[in-house]
Amino acid sequence: METRPGSRHTGIIVNVPALGGKRFLHLAWHYTFLNDEIPEGCYFYRNETLSKGEQEYFSERLIRRWEKNGNKVAYGLDYDGTPAFNSQDEFDGSEGRGLTCATFVLDFLGECGLHICDVPTWKYRPEDGRFQQFVYDVLSSRLCAPEDAEQLERVKRSVGTAPRFRPEEVAACFVRYEDDPVEMPPAQFWGHEVLYESGMRVV
């Protein structure tokens, strides 16, 4: 979905009958992992290879993750593909670790066995520096306590260096994933297709 012109957001939609049906689970911001009704303006991208049983398993596990970590998942920029949650499904924010909306999706799917992106092939793109600087500027006004220093410093180091996994690229990789992780060049192309067909602005 587009949150404002040129700014995209992604999450996972699951079916949870106990909560009234389909829900949108997403990392909205720092310590803000939400379980929402599906907002207006969403575009849906599904992977047709998933069985009903797999979809139910993913739904149950993601709801459990939300129940344990709703206000505990930090925001960060330097995703490296290693699991961000421990074996008890608890977020591991050690050494200042954090996730974006897109890397939260990657991390969850990866732990469920769907490694949709070939993480090492992603490279920093200069045009992503503006987004990273925005994140740092906003977090620097919020992470003021001494215990936040490590995380803020890690975000600062990521500005202008960390590869960015864009929401539209993650959605495109999910649709096309079969057995092998998708590398960055085709993901970029398919990500632009997502923006084009949804009418979102390319910046």
Image (tube, grey):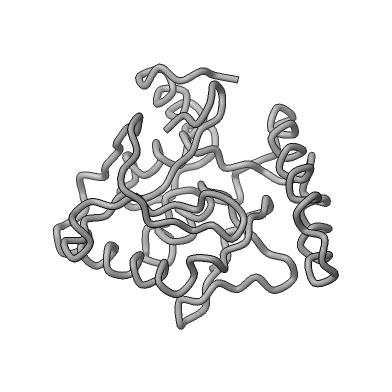
The quarter of the displayed image where residue 17 is located: bottom left
Q: Nearer the viewer, residue 97 or 69?
A: 69
Instruction: Identify the residue at horizontal 48%, vertical 66% (top origin).
Output: 70
Q: Residue furthest bottom?
A: 88
Where's residue 175, x and y in %? 32, 40
Instruction: Identify the residue at horizontal 33%, vertical 69% (top origin).
Output: 61
Instruction: Identify the residue at horizontal 41%, vertical 22% (top origin).
Output: 193
* Position of 3 relative to 74 (above/below): above
Where's residue 124, x and y in %? 70, 38
* Position of 168 relative to 18 (above/below): above
The quarter of the displayed image where residue 47 is located: top left
* Position of 8 relative to 117 (above/below): above
Where's residue 199, x and y in %? 40, 17
The quarter of the displayed image where residue 83 is located: bottom right
* Position of 184 relative to 109 (above/below): above
Quadrant in which the C terminus is drawn: top right
Where's residue 160, x and y in %? 79, 39
**105 lies left or right of 24:** right
Quadrant in which the N terminus is drawn: top left
**202 lies left or right of 179:** right
Q: Nearer the viewer, residue 69 or 174?
A: 69
Q: Nearer the viewer, residue 48 or 70?
A: 70
**63 lies left or right of 79:** left
Instruction: Identify the residue at horizontal 44%, vertical 23% (top origin).
Output: 195
